[in-house]
Amino acid sequence: MKIRSGFVSNSSSSSFIVLGATLSKPKEIDEDTWNDFTCGEEPTYGLVCHYLDGKRYVVGKEIASGYSDGDSMEETETSFEELAVMSKEVKESVKKMIGLDIETKLITGTRNS
């Protein structure tokens, strides 16, 4: 039996670590292309897309994630060499899909699930 102390809410959330970019819809990209890119059923080119708020998305390769239901974030090990390869793949995928050149970063956050 789990006993929670401290703040308890009815909403669930998930934490994530993504190698990618935080993006808002650029004016030059049409709505259909943007929606396919950010709202697709399956990850496109192996990328994840996390909705943050009304206008921003985190797009990239997920390094780790976890949920607020008492489970911790899974343990992972990723070398700097692997991160460099992943970074290149993310940049190339975003460029192919929506024509943007991005700077990849490690992005951490929590979102509603």
Image (cartoon, helix red, strand yellow):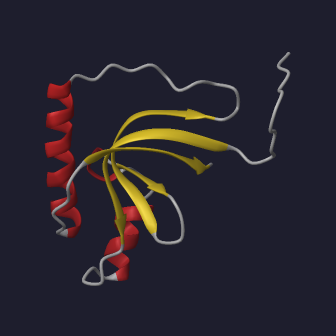
Closer to the camera, 91 or 30?
91
Which residue is at a point 45% across and 19% down the rendered structure image?
75
Q: Is residue 30 above or below residue 108?
A: below
Classify residue 6 as left or right of residue 67.
right
Classify residue 48 as left or right of residue 13.
left
Q: Is residue 70 above or below residue 68?
A: above
Q: Quadrant of the N terminus?
A: top right
From this viewpoint, which residue is outermost toward the front? 6
From this viewpoint, which residue is outermost toward the top? 1
Locate residue 107: give its quadrant: top left
Locate residue 69: give its quadrant: top right
Closer to the camera, 100 or 104?
104
Q: Position of residue 37 (x, y in %)?
A: 34, 64
Q: Position of residue 83 (x, y in %)?
A: 21, 33
Which residue is at a point 37% across and 42% down the rendered structure image?
18
Which residue is at a point 38% across and 21% down the rendered structure image?
76
Q: Position of residue 102 (x, y in %)?
A: 20, 59
Which residue is at a point 24% across and 83% down the rendered structure image?
28
Q: Is residue 2 above or below residue 58?
A: above
Locate residue 39: give its quadrant: bottom left
Query: What count of labels does the image hold?
Result: 0
Q: Position of residue 27 (x, y in %)?
A: 30, 84
Classify residue 91 as left or right of residue 78.
left
